[in-house]
């Protein structure tokens, strides 16, 4: 009985995430959503770059998993998120983004390791002042607002493409 109930729950989660991901539309007020957020997004069920079992596992681990890109992409569409910075950089169009050379407020910054080039952290630009980027971002269990981005080596910028 427990196995049938568990299977039914997993099937329901899969169907609902599938339906929501196709029926949902991007949030045009993503900056307001970022300002109102108080915690990282620990729900990975809508991460389009992970398998169903991976999504469930990451959601169950929640606070133990990296949350930066999942949180930032959820501001734009909570039912169409990304769980890995590398996947986002390789195919930003999958999440309705394009790479840009001139960052603006509302763009996503991806930080890369200077030695390996590997993408490792995502932030949302909420203010640009005198060449400094102020961002909202998540680091595991913490959500920080309007903090200056200190490490500015090897950055790429991505702009949301509204439909």
Image (tube, rainbow, N blue to C red):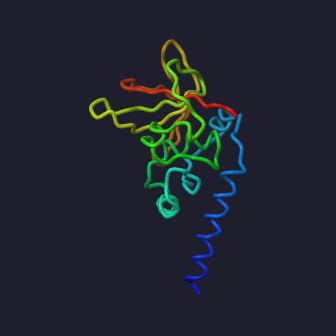
- Which residue is drawn at the image coordinates 55% and 51% (left, top)? 48
In the image, residue 10 above or below residue 65: below
Q: Residue furthest bottom?
A: 1
- Which residue is drawn at the image coordinates 48% and 18% (left, top)? 132
In the image, residue 1 above or below residue 154: below
Tell me if 13 is positioned left or right of 57 in this view.
Answer: right
**Which x, y percent locates residue 33?**
67, 38
In the image, residue 40 above or below residue 6: above
Q: Residue furthest left?
A: 115
Tell me if 157 is positioned left or right of 32 in this view.
Answer: left
Instruction: Point out the image quarter for the C terminus.
Output: top right
Viewer-side residue, 20 vs 1: 20
In the image, residue 29 above or below residue 64: above
- Which residue is drawn at the image coordinates 59% and 82% (left, top)? 4
Q: Residue furthest top?
A: 130
**Which x, y percent locates residue 31?**
65, 32
**Which x, y percent locates residue 70?**
53, 46
**Which x, y percent locates residue 45?**
57, 57
């Amino acid at each position: 009985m427990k196995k049938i109930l568990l299977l039914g729950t997993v099937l329901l989660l899969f169907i609902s995430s599938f339906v929501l991901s196709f029926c949902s539309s991007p949030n045009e007020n993503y900056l307001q959503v970022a300002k109102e957020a108080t915690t990282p997004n620990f729900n990975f069920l809508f991460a389009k770059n992970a398998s169903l079992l991976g999504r469930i596992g990451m959601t169950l681990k929640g606070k133990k998993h990296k949350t930066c890109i999942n949180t930032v992409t959820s501001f734009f569409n909570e039912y169409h998120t990304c769980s890995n910075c590398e996947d986002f950089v390789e195919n930003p169009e999958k999440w309705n983004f394009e790479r840009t050379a001139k960052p603006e407020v509302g763009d996503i910054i991806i930080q890369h390791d200077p030695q390996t080039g590997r993408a490792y952290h995502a932030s949302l630009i909420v203010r640009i002042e005198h060449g400094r980027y102020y961002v909202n971002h998540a680091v595991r269990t913490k959500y920080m607002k309007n903090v200056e981005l200190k490490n500015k080596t090897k950055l790429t910028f991505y702009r949301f493409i509204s439909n």
